[in-house]
Image (spheres, helix red, strand yellow):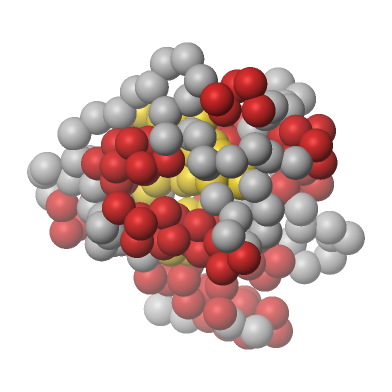
Amino acid sequence: MVIRYTAPLFSIGHSIVKMLANSVVVLDFETTGLSPMQGDRAIEIGAVKIVDGQCIDTYQQLMYPGRRVSSFIEQYTGINNQMLANAAPCSVVMDEFADFIGGCNLVAHNASFDKRFLDAEFDRIGRSYTGEFACSLLLARRLYQTIPSHKLGALVDYKQIATDGVFHRALADAQMTADLWLAMLADIEQDYQRNMPTFKLIQKLCKTPKAGISKLLSAR
């Protein structure tokens, strides 16, 4: 298993680049369950680092959560207890991942889920992050209001994003989310002539009622 990560991203033009929605870290967790408040832990992290709309790096690692995972999780993710027994502990992996994030803003599909686990795992090791989160699921619901499902797989099909057919593994899901994110930014630029939308604008879109999206994006 290959782990790749670079030095903090924004060494040049930090404040300018960080403003843009096309320069982010897109991440995905696989976990033992739904809530860190109920004792659930991360078992895999995958992330794609995007700068100026281009993927420049990835990070993926299994991590041992300190206990066995259920047969349901094994079947859902394909991650079994033998694989986790040979993995580094969560503390080691998450410490590396904190370095990978650097000062980047963050994106995830159903971001509230991934943010809860990121916060919980970082709290355990005394690490933090300075970037902010945006949710590709919320953005998709506002841009593509007429489609019946906004699950990641349905959106990948809708936008005709090429995949290798793997779902519910962290790096595969992070890569699909990254491709979806860039496709949505391209749609905003094309449909509303919003060249290089900022991360703040996307965050605002995610909180805007659906009926107000066109007015917000058309405003100057």
Total numbered labels: 0
Q: Nearer the viewer, residue 103 or 200?
A: 103
Instruction: Report the quarter where the C terminus lies.
Output: bottom left
Q: Position of residue 55 (x, y in %)?
A: 41, 31
Q: Is residue 114 left or right of residue 121?
A: right
Residue 98 in sight from this viewpoint: yes
- State the image quarter where residue 177 is shown: top right
Residue ID at (61%, 77%): 213
* Residue 113 at x, y percent in the picture: 59, 61
Instruction: Kindly give the residue lying farthest to the front in the view shown.
Output: 67
Whether residue 157 is visible, yes or no, is: no
Residue positioned 16% across, 59% down in the render: 15
Residue at (24% x, 47% y) in the render: 102
Nearest the camera: 44 or 84? 84
Residue extending farthest to the left is 12
Q: Identify which residue is drawn at 49% across, 34% down.
A: 63
- Residue 93: x percent and y percent? 37, 36
Query: Would you say 195 lies left or right of 73 here?
Result: left
In the rendered view, does 198 fall on the left or right side of 128?
right
Which residue sits furthest right?
Answer: 148
Tell me where residue 22 appears, x and y as whole percent.
40, 49
